[in-house]
Image (cartoon, helix red, strand yellow):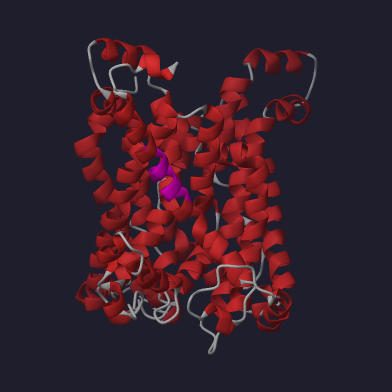
Amino acid sequence: MQNVKRSAHTPKTQTLARLAKLNFLAFGIVITIFPFVWVALMGTHTRSEIFSSPPPFYIGDNFIDNYYKLLEIMPFWLVLWNSLFISVMGTIGAVFFCSLCAYGFFAFEFRGKNIIFTLMIASMMVPPALLLIPFFLTVQFLGILDTHFALWFPAIANAFGIFLVRQYMVTAISKDLLDAAKVDGASHLRIFLVIVLPLIKPVLATLGIVMFIGLWNNFLSPLIVLSSPDKFVLTLALRSVQSLGDSPWGAVMLGTFLSMLPLLIAFLFFSKQIMAGLTAGAVKG
Amino acid sequence: MQFVGLQNYITALDDPWFWKSLYNTLWLAIVSGVPQHILAIPTAYILVATLRPMLRHIISATLFIPFITSTVAVSMIFYSIYSANTGILNQILVGLAQVPIIGWLFSWAPDAMPIQWLTRSDLLKPAISAVVIWKYTGFNILVYSAGFMTVPNQLYDAAKVDGCNRFQLFWHIALPMIRPFIFFALTLTIIGNLQLFEEPFILTTGDSGGIAQSGLTTTYYLYLVGWEWLEMGSASAISWILFLLIALATAIHFFFNGKQGMEGHR
């Protein structure tokens, strides 16, 4: 069928082009995947095997030793729990409060609404690196340095989430529906919980995905907020074992691999939703 | 706290490390930014124009994986890959020199060993850029795929009737149609790349910007000044200057590309 369509090309150049295209894509995929395969392999080797030549392109038998070594150099499960706790609290909080606030922007008319909404969107333009100092000073002022609270609580009200949910509400919910519910005597809280929330489930999933991945991978704010090793999150704990003298690379690489594993597994099952979520702003742009 | 006028700004502008960090930031922003798009646009076009949706999804999802993994974890992996004496990259280069046909391309490799990717001031920035390109190209491919999918098929058909070949279809039909997407993706790259922190920080083990400060980006320096040296005042001045730099770069981008970028939109 295709041959007929593209009769302008001779079969020979066509096969060549096809071959080049496939090689190009295959090369890209190999480059993309290789570091992940490599880290998984290294997690199963001893230090001397990793540093041997030729490099060990096979699954080693030192996994158990590396695992115990990993527990020696950092409290891995505690740190994993810290990451999970912060990510889950921040995600649940953000999904609830952002949709609540978005409902406010969607359902109510009040003076200065447009100005507040514009200001909120403008705040999204401020590069995160620049918010570091005000964030740190606020946390310090509130006396919540070195707590997990300082990491997940500020995340629950964020302009991106409110904007995302509000935009979705505009397309998914008709004002008539709200009016009908009001005529029936439903309070705003009831309308929000019973009518609006079920209708905006898809965007809540999107927001949840974006929040969870962002919080799980977060490094800069834990770096400036947390100081005691038993409160560290995964990213911070990994960095702290990076420059140990005589680094046990097998154990460090095992820890690195395990820290990525939850998101990788989630991506295996929900790749469509995750990709749509993380490009939400872009694709609608 | 006491009022010191512009003292913090003067300190920052007098500081050779600060100027170095600005230079590094701009260098990295360009070298790690441009290739992302040069790679992503043709890849996205190939994916959209020639592959079935199922295969397209599998490939673009695979290329997207680096984007969802933590930058710290990824940089740790590359830290070991770049390792001079035993890193897999150097071993692969030596290995390639022994492969029959393409070996001569890499014949320089065995003599150059060990290549100190992360502890040579001329190689550190390219090494950092490679990680950034590796991590964000998949995201751009996704954005551009969405762009190419908005191009109506009739346009291609009409152009084919007029005798356009494949390349002309890409260059004259598809590319102009995705201008808004290029504009948007470039904006994200500019803003993101001017704030690079985690990649250089991990690859230099957080040690004052690596050899001769050649990996010191402005955000990295901001962190060192504010949290290692506890000079919040100077750090604030640096962050304002960085803000101006980002605003300026974005404004220049909007000025030159904005009109065309927005135009395909409405």
As for residue B265 lying within the magenta part, the answer is no
Residue B78 in picture, x, y percent from top left: 46, 68
Residue in front for this viewpoint, B156 or B163? B163
Residue in front for this viewpoint, B86 or B153? B86
Residue A172 in picture, x, y percent from top left: 62, 21
Q: Is residue A120 left or right of residue A152?
A: left
Q: Is residue A193 above or below residue B140?
A: above
Name the image quarter holding residue B27.
bottom left
Residue B53 in picture, x, y percent from top left: 53, 28
Name the image quarter holding residue A260.
bottom right
Q: Is residue B255 above or below residue A178?
A: below
Name the image quarter holding residue A154.
bottom right
As for residue A22 lying within the magenta part, the answer is yes
Which residue appears at 39% of the width and 70% of the height? B95
Q: Is residue B15 visible?
A: no
Instruction: Check the picture and name the quadrant holding the C terminus of chain B.
Output: top left
Kindly report the secondary structure that dominates the magenta region of the rendered protein: helix
Residue in front for this viewpoint, B207 or B45? B45
Residue B89 in picture, x, y percent from top left: 41, 69
Magenta residues, start to end: A21-29
Residue in front for this viewpoint, B141 or B167? B167
